[in-house]
Image (cartoon, rainbow, N blue to C red):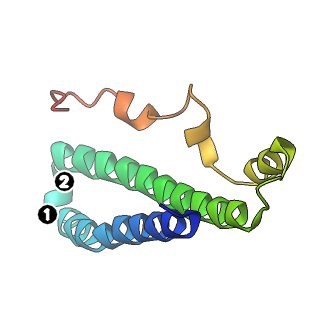
Amino acid sequence: MSLHKLAKELDETARQSASMLEGITEALEILADGKLNKDPSVRDAVAVIITALQGQDRIEQRCHNMALATRQFALLPASAPESVYNEIWSTLTLDELRVPSLSGIAAHQNHGDAELF
């Protein structure tokens, strides 16, 4: 797979991930209804969904940044030194997903539900 094709696939992954948000946002609007929102379990569910959406946003950002890096790699000559590749990586904003102690922190929150995955 060429680097340009990889970049295109990363962009498409980010686009598909972002398009999921429309349905999830509609569900949140329903859950935010005044009558439903009084139920503590509904409020807890809304909080869990919002945390997951924040994770999705970081994944989308990460895909876009990796696509950018991939396009920059594709422009480099085969003889480019490793330091040039490292410089490209160092300019990316990969958010806390790059920090192992923070990566996946939302998945480790105690929400009282059984883990299915």
> What's under tag 2, amino acid-wise?
Lys
For the residue pair 17 and 110, the one nearer the viewer reads as 17
Query: In the rendered image, which quarter is residue 91 located in?
Result: bottom right
- Kindly identify which residue carries mark 2: 38
Q: Is residue 20 above or below residue 51?
A: below
Name the residue rendered at 29%, 74% in the picture.
Answer: 22
SS label for mark 2: helix
Residue 97 lies, in percent from the top left, at 55, 41
13 displayed left or right of 43 = right
Viewer-nearest residue: 3 or 67: 3
**Which residue lies most toward the front here?**
79
In whole angstroms, how far apart are the C-alphas of marks 2 and 1?
6 Å
Is 27 displayed left or right of 103 in the figure? left
Q: Residue at x 34, y 69 (%)?
A: 16
Q: Position of residue 114 (x, y in %)?
A: 15, 27
Expressed as whole percent of the image width and height from the top left, the position of residue 110 reads 31, 26
Q: Secondary structure at mark 1?
A: loop
Q: Amino acid at mark 1?
A: Lys
Which residue is tagged 1? 35
